[in-house]
């Protein structure tokens, strides 16, 4: 029904208007709360996994950017999610980049976004989260306010301010986004900067919230090595692998259309191989107890399994929700549970196992 009816209508609208409409409509999903609760209650134990210190019932999370201001935490479990990453929140409220800044690439099932970290700001979002009953485990993603004057020490202060706003909330983890391609800075991931942020957040982190770093699939090996080494110094719990890419290679969308769109982060299936590569590189570099949350082009249970077998404890989705519909987490969980059952495995045994699925053409998954 989503693909036949809802999506064609939504795709007639400008993408950001459609996103706003989805935000207004999603609370209606509460009407299926009892059905979704039954589904959650009957989830196979094989899907359980760990993020930070917590066990979660299913590994499919909502990626950052969809619920930037933490307005949907009461309803997201009704869509089948195991957890949600709210944000990015920023130290100051920000309008983001001028519109249009969100573009669909239907022939690639992809999105290019040049949002530029729009949001209500850390104080407003943390106050909202503090007053909300979460329907599922909630994490928060922090990024630096996208303003050319906030650089150097004030950039560190900006991120640390956001952390101080949320540090007492009952969060699954906090992700620090050092990889947004849509801001004034292109070198945010400089290791010295990351170290300063980690030192300050560690000092303030009296509730010992697990800290994750959200990495870029465009980072080179050297930078990844340095960041992972720095992460050890500050007891970072893990990595979100990863953010959108600025790479446009291999797309079916014509070059003229891409030029007309201009800069921005690409997400969806064309990102998958880069995200998978990032995941494998980080898995090889990280400490055993550090965890990976995979993100980038995940659309099916088979995709989720591929990332888990490459080292991820959990997966996150955004773009596939737009193309496949809001209840996609139910399908990904069902398919993933079937894949695990076929192998008589539980998810935690599959993490980093390197098992490769046969393709649909070569036999059952
Ligand atoms: C419209 C849009 C906004 C996003 N905003 C953020 C953000 O604020 N912070 C962040 O860390 N990632 C953001 N992302 C990146 C996603 O969290 C995710 O890393 C990326 O889209 C890859 O996953 P996907 O292929 O499942 O969409 C955004 C993505 C999109 C499409």
Image (spheres, helix red, strand yellow):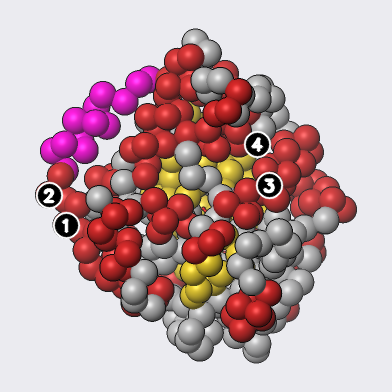
Q: Nearer the viewer, mark 2 or mark 3?
A: 3
Judge from the rendering whether residue 162 lies leftward or rightward of residue 282; answer left or right.
left
Could you tell me residue 127's position as x and y percent?
Answer: 32, 67
Report, in whole angstroms, how far the alpha carbon at label 3 lies from the one at label 1.
Answer: 35 Å
Q: Earlier in the sequence, mark 4 or mark 1?
A: 1
* Depth order, front residue of 25/240: 25
For label 4, the SS is: loop
For label 3, the SS is: helix
* Depth order, front residue of 91/308: 308
Q: Is residue 44 magenta?
A: yes
Query: In this picture, is 13 found above or below 55?
Result: below
Query: In this picture, is 2 found above or below 8?
Result: above
Q: Which residue is mark 1?
A: 28
Q: Which residues are magenta?
A: 33-45
* Depth order, front residue of 341/196: 341
Could you tell me residue 259's position as x and y percent?
Answer: 66, 81
Give me the residue at 70% from left, 78% from top.
Answer: 185
Q: Which residue is mark 4?
A: 290
Q: Earlier in the sequence, mark 2 or mark 3?
A: 2
Q: Is residue 211 magenta?
A: no
Q: Earlier in the sequence, mark 3 or mark 4?
A: 3
Report, in whole angstroms, how far the alpha carbon at label 2 lies from the one at label 3.
Answer: 37 Å
Could you tell me residue 250's position as x and y percent?
Answer: 71, 59
Residue 31 is tagged as 2
Magenta span main SS: helix
* Depth order, front residue of 204/232: 232
Report, in whole angstroms, how far the alpha carbon at label 4 lies from the one at label 2.
Answer: 38 Å
Q: Label 2 near label 1: C-beta < 8 Å?
A: yes
Report, in whole angstroms, how far the alpha carbon at label 4 lies from the one at label 1.
Answer: 37 Å
Residue 273 is tagged as 3
**Furthest residue in direction top, as rendered:** 344
């Amino acid at each position: 029904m989503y693909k036949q009816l809802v999506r064609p209508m939504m795709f007639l609208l400008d993408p950001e208007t459609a996103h706003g409409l989805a935000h207004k409509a999603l609370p209606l999903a509460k009407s299926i709360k009892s059905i979704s609760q039954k589904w959650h209650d009957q989830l196979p134990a094989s899907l359980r996994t760990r993020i930070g210190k917590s066990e979660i019932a299913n590994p499919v999370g909502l990626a950052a950017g969809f619920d930037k201001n933490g307005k949907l935490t009461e309803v997201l479990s009704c869509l089948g999610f195991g957890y949600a990453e709210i944000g990015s929140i920023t130290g100051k409220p920000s309008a983001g980049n001028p519109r249009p800044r969100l573009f669909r690439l239907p022939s690639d099932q992809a999105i290019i976004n040049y949002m530029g970290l729009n949001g209500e700001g850390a104080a407003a979002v943390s106050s909202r989260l503090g007053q909300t009953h979460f329907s599922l485990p909630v994490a928060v993603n922090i990024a630096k306010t996208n303003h050319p004057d906030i650089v150097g020490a004030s950039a560190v202060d900006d991120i640390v301010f956001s952390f101080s706003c949320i540090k007492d909330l009952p969060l699954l983890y906090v992700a620090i986004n050092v990889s947004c391609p849509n801001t004034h800075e292109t070198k945010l991931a400089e290791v010295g900067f990351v170290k300063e942020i980690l030192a300050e957040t560690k000092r303030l982190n009296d509730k010992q919230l697990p800290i994750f770093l959200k990495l870029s699939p465009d980072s080179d090996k050297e930078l990844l090595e340095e960041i992972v080494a720095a992460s050890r110094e500050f007891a970072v719990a893990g990595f979100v692998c990863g953010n959108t890419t600025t790479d446009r290679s291999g797309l079916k969308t014509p070059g003229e259309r891409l030029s007309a769109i201009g800069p921005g982060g690409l997400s969806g299936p064309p990102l998958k191989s880069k995200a998978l590569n990032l995941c494998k590189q980080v898995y090889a570099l990280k400490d055993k107890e550090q965890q990976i949350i995979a993100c980038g082009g995940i659309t099916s249970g088979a995709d989720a399994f591929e990332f888990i077998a490459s080292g991820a404890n959990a997966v996150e989705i955004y773009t596939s929700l737009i193309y496949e519909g809001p209840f996609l987490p139910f399908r990904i969980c069902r398919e993933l549970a079937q894949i695990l059952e076929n192998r008589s495995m539980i998810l935690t045994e599959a993490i980093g196992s390197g098992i490769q699925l046969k393709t649909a053409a070569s036999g059952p998954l």
